[in-house]
Image (spheres, rainbow, N blue to C red):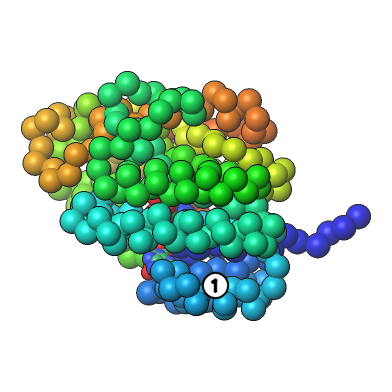
């Protein structure tokens, strides 16, 4: 039996998804990890780490020198929706041009490309969204991510997977995602206001990673929706988190996004329908409550502080 591990290139390795991948995936694959401003520390022997600006064409030389790859998980991006709106050209550079470059590189290497895309590409009027629904982005972040999907698809490299998702989890960096921010505020007994009319279907990043492992190991291609089996509002999500982490739910006030002063238009209903992908994938996608319960178990296992040792 051939037990040689696959060689997988992970971009965005200091981000929320990439950091968790670097923490978990060396058990499955040999890893080449690319960060930009951050440097990885305390990594196992089967990770080669690079700090590269992937906007620079020459960065590909360093990656070519590492030898052939079996797969690429492209998770590097500009995920700050406000910054994307203020600097659309920067958003295009980081979210579209680099993705296209990674797709060309994957084709050159005959490697499987997994592009991490987003639920944000839909306008949020008629969710939940099926894989077959036409995306109609309403802000620059979404436009730059959809354009990346289109550029990659146009290259017609058959070994390509586009994973549309939304996730939460513990971050290698000292910055919070939505779940981390909610818990931090509630732990400090600060009141928070959460939208009742913004719906999504997030899953724990560790559950997403289990599915990415299956996608690469089983060579699953095409566009996949990888999300919670159900959906909820941001308010309901906060209430579930507060319950699971024994915080005071009275600190949470339900509000409408229409009452807020967000500078950038955001879709209201970002829920993803997972039926088509669930028929292909063996790994079951969790409900939101299941993800939150696993998130709590990881907290008890000190996962949040262990993962921070990578930076
Ligand atoms: N978070 C979510 O809920 C969510 C939802 C849907 C889709 N997504 C998608 O999932 C992917 C991962 O998101 P995330 O939240 O994990 O991202 P993130 O935490 O914002 O991390 C972004 C990563 O991109 C790297 N990067 C930025 N500019 C770069 C450059 N010029 N060259 C090389 N690397 C660069 C950063 O490196 P340094 O930090 O070292 O500079 C960092 O590792 C993205 O494609 C995002 O669009 C995220």
Relative side of 105 to 132, left or right: right
Query: Compared with residue 78, is residue 232 higher up or lower down, i.e. above or below?
Result: above
Ligand 1 located in image quadrant = bottom left
In the rendered image, residue 153, in percent from the top left (x then y), is placed at 53, 44
Residue at 32 percent of width and 33 percent of height: 136
In the rendered image, residue 304, in percent from the top left (x then y), is placed at 43, 59
In the rendered image, residue 70, in percent from the top left (x then y), is placed at 70, 59
Relative side of 6 to 224, left or right: right
In the rendered image, residue 288, in percent from the top left (x then y), is placed at 43, 32
Residue 216 is at least partly visible in this image: yes
Query: Compared with residue 85, is residue 94 higher up or lower down, i.e. above or below?
Result: below
Image quadrant where one finds the C terminus: bottom left
Ligand 1 within 8 Å of the CB at mark 1: no
Q: Quadrant of residue 243?
A: top left
Image quadrant where one finds the N terminus: bottom right
Query: Compared with residue 224, is residue 28 higher up or lower down, i.e. above or below?
Result: below
Residue at 26 percent of width and 33 percent of height: 267
Secondary structure under badge 1? helix
Relative side of 10 to 6, left or right: left
Residue at 75 percent of width and 61 percent of height: 5
Residue 229 is at least partly visible in this image: no
Q: Callout 1 environment at 10 Å: few (<14), some (14 to 19), or many (20+)?
A: some
Q: Which residue is mark 1?
A: 60
Residue at 47 percent of width and 48 percent of height: 151
Q: How many marks?
A: 1
Q: Residue furthest right?
A: 1
């Amino acid at each position: 039996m051939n037990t040689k591990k696959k060689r997988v290139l992970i971009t965005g390795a200091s981000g929320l998804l990439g950091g968790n991948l670097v923490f978990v995936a060396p058990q499955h694959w040999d890893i080449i990890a690319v960060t930009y401003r951050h440097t990885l520390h305390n990594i196992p022997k089967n990770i080669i780490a690079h700090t590269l600006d992937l906007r620079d064409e020459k960065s590909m030389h360093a990656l070519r020198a590492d030898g052939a790859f079996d797969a690429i998980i492209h998770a590097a991006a500009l995920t700050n929706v406000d910054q994307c709106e203020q600097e659309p050209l920067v958003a295009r550079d980081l979210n579209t041009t680099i993705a296209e470059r990674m797709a060309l590189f994957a084709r050159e290497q005959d490697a499987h490309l997994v592009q991490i895309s987003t639920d944000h590409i839909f306008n949020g009027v008629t969710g939940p969204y099926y894989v077959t629904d036409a995306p109609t982005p309403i802000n620059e972040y979404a436009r730059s991510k959809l354009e990346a999907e289109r550029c990659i698809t146009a290259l017609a490299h058959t070994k390509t997977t586009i994973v549309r998702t939304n996730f939460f989890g513990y971050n290698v960096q000292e910055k919070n995602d939505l779940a981390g921010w909610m818990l931090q505020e509630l732990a400090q007994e600060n009141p928070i206001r959460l939208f009742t009319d913004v719906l999504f279907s997030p899953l724990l990043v560790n559950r997403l990673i289990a599915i990415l492992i299956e996608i690469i190991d089983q060579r699953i291609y095409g566009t996949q929706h990888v999300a919670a089996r159900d959906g909820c509002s941001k308010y309901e999500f906060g209430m579930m988190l507060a319950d699971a982490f024994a915080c005071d739910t009275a600190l949470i006030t339900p509000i409408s996004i229409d009452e807020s002063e967000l500078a950038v238009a955001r879709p209201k209903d970002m829920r993803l329908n997972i039926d088509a992908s669930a028929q292909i994938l063996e790994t079951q996608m969790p409900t939101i409550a299941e993800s939150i319960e696993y998130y709590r178990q990881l907290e008890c296992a000190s996962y949040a502080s262990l993962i921070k040792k990578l930076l």
